[in-house]
Amino acid sequence: MTESEKAIEYYRAGVENRAPQFVPCRIRLKSQVRGDFPIGHRTIAEAGEHDCHSNRWGAVSVIATNGQRLGIRPTEFDPVAWRENSATAPTTPSSSPAPQDTLPGDTRP
């Protein structure tokens, strides 16, 4: 997939309310981003490129200047690099745990 196709898939997944196949792993902040008042207003991420963390739904956060994670809104960044979303990657039967018929400690036959 091209970078543009990954971006389209990412934004389309947001509109369709599903987990995207690809999520940002590096972003460019257009300007300084400050956390919301009153809790995070001292948490600041400077403009420029940042490695970022994306959850399974594609929500993005960066490490701010105070070392805390700061959530970034989609309008505040441009994706620079992508990674496959491990939450949507197909699993092989050998990597999945065997189904459990009983709960631990259950002594019923």
Image (cartoon, rainbow, N blue to C red):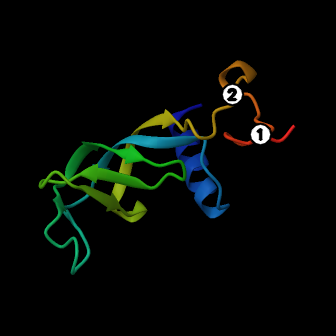
Under mark 1, the amino acid is Thr
User: Which residue is pictured at 67% across the width and 41% down the height?
Assistant: 105
Residue placed under numbered mark 2 in the picture: 96
Q: Is residue 20 left or right of residue 92?
A: left
Q: Is residue 67 left or right of residue 51?
A: left
Residue placed under numbered mark 1 in the picture: 107
Residue 106, image x and y in percent? 74, 42
User: Which comes sooner in the sequence, label 2 or label 1?
Assistant: 2
Above or below 20: residue 96: above
Under mark 2, the amino acid is Ser
User: Dot 2, crowdedness within 10 Å: few (<14), some or many (≥20)?
Assistant: few
**Which quadrant of the rendered structure holds the C terminus?**
top right
In which quarter of the view is residue 41 placed? bottom left
Tally of marks: 2
Residue 67, image x and y in percent? 16, 51
Q: Nearer the viewer, residue 108 or 59?
A: 108
In which quarter of the view is residue 42 placed? bottom left
Residue 99, image x and y in percent? 77, 33
Label 1 element class: loop
User: Which residue is pictured at 33% across the width and 60% down the height?
Assistant: 71
Which mark lies nearer to you, 2 or 1?
1
User: Which residue is pictured at 83% across the width and 42% down the height?
Assistant: 108
Residue 14 is tagged as none
Q: Residue furthest top?
A: 94
Q: Residue furthest bottom?
A: 38
